[in-house]
Amino acid sequence: MATKVIVIGGGVAGMTVAHELAQRDGFEVVVYEQRAVPGGKARSIDAVGQETGVTGLPGEHGFRFFPGFYRHVTDTMSQIPFGPGSTVFDNLTQSTRVEIAQRGKRALVAPAQFPGSIGELLLALQAGWDYATQLGIPLADQLHFYDVLGKLLCACKARRFDEFENESWWQFSGAQQRSAGYRRYLADGLTRTLVAARAREMSARTGGYILLQLLQDMMRPGAEVDRVLNGPTSDVWINPWLSHIRDLGVDYRLGHRVEVIHSRGIEVTGVSGHQVAWPGQRVGSSFADRADYYVSAVPVEVMQSEIKLALKQRSPQLKNLDRLVYRWMNGIMFYLTEDLPLIHGHLIVIDSPWSLTAISQRQFWPGVDFSKFAAGKVNGILSVDISDWTTKGKYAAKGKPAETCTKPEIADEVWAQLKASLNGATEVLRDNMLFDWFLDPDIVSPNPRAADTNLEPLLVNTKGSWRYRPEAALPEVPNLFLASDYVRTYTDLATMEGANEAGRRAVNAILDATHSNATRCKLWKLHEPGGPFALGRLADRLIYAAS
């Protein structure tokens, strides 16, 4: 008789659990996903223009970014068929440039990978020179930053977790005692790409070691450092994934919101909830289900307050979830009447009050027929992530943070911030090229007088939070497992990679609990450079143990 597993949540983590279990004999898997579409935050959206009402526009929760050090999620992608002889992994394409835009100054453009030609080498040298001379970072501060990197590279594991984990990246990097240029570009700026990360809050252990992963990727010849998808996420990844796991036998149920995890003693006995239409209105009958094992693959804020779980009182790890922090990070799409490639990669608007990063999508979507969007009126898409929702705006939203703005105010302010940094001697962004815009539908307004609400915020890494993060398996609850980006992972960030790794850890825990002979899911540690740095870590381990 098959072992039944109920998975609560059908995002990247939940789909990973279902995929991995379904590939192994002896498991019956049911997934409950409250949305009408699969994929959670990773899904695409059939957008409706907020000004024109045009339907069928391609929308995203935010642009997708697959650094070279991602191993877990890309391994799963390589197992999902996509047409004859190919997989979803083949839909990843390498960006070649990264640009740092700033008001009143020439943009900094650098290769997004190790230079593979004389032209790229010259570009890298120019970018290095500009970074050293144009950004107002004194030589002493630049040398100090190299010392910070060396300290990271040569620190032993115990020191990282005992010291670096409990210190913010801002403190660790010495930002407060350094120049304004150092604080902006090396302390704050380098954490901008680390999903919802803030230098003053993020642990030095996590921020530093993810930064080292990115730098190591850029130093490896031939490495694919910065990959993006070649089409809308659901089209080229999520929908093929759903089809594949259903073919494997997974019962994936859309529009079902689990509201209660029932228990008796220390064991989960079932789940119950209602059929819903997003954003959460009950539209159908209630449901209840039982299984041998249960996996919670929902975000931390859902586990904190939106699912009734009496077992919280019996499990210190579940109670500690209330100590974890989450914040807003969402995307807005600008649909343009003309294609505006900008840069073949990511654009970091370094001085934008709302910490904007962007990517021009069409150049990476060669197979997408743009003539079908708004009868051919949309010829370009600018996808923008808004990372800071608490700092006051400067233009349309002057004096108001994004979290209290109306949707039109957010759109106008983001567009103005982009223009302020991109437009100089040349007018790169013009108002007459803006056809329409679409804000992530997770931002909703309860009523016209209330501040907007974020239905899916993002976990943020804060110093010292590792102690509150649970393992995938809960010692006090033998048949409940956790698979979300708040689970302890090597990745240690709220990312698709972290969610996939957490899902794999939950599956391994279930295999252990059932004494299964099946092969365990593969897990990859973050890469540690060898040579003199390995000797440095060995020496530091001895010094730390003796101190």
Image: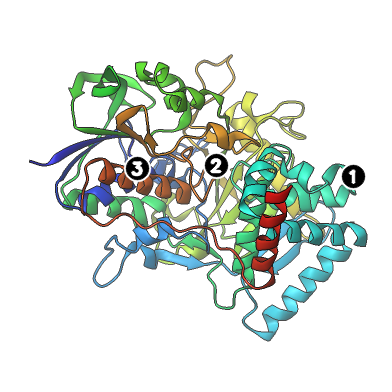
Tell me which amino acid carries mark 3. Ala
Tell me which amino acid carries mark 1. Gln
Q: Is residue 71 left or right of residue 430?
A: left
Tell me if residue 342 can be seen: no
Circle 1 sits in a helix, a strand or a loop, which is it?
Answer: helix
Residue at horizontal 26%, vertical 66%? 83
Mark drawn on residue 506? 3
State the image coordinates of residue 394 (x, y, percent, origin top left): 77, 34
Q: Is residue 346 left or right of residue 167?
A: left
Q: Spatial distance from mark 2 to mark 3, Cα to Cα?
A: 29 Å
Judge whether 310 appears above or below 121 on screen. above
Q: Which residue is mark 1?
A: 177
Q: Is residue 264 left or right of residue 216?
A: left
- Of mark 1 and mark 2, the one earlier in the sequence is 1
| Residue nearer the viewer, 426 or 358 | 358
**Is the residue under label 3 in contact with that under label 2 (CB below 8 Å)?**
no
Judge whether 291 appears above or below 98 on screen. above
Mark drawn on residue 331? 2
Mark drawn on residue 278? none
State the image coordinates of residue 191 (x, y, percent, origin top left): 68, 49
Q: How is the image coloured?
A: rainbow
Circle 3 sits in a helix, a strand or a loop, which is it?
Answer: helix
Tell me if residue 115 can be seen: yes
Q: Which quadrant of the view contains residue 324? A: top right
| Residue nearer the viewer, 271 or 228 | 271
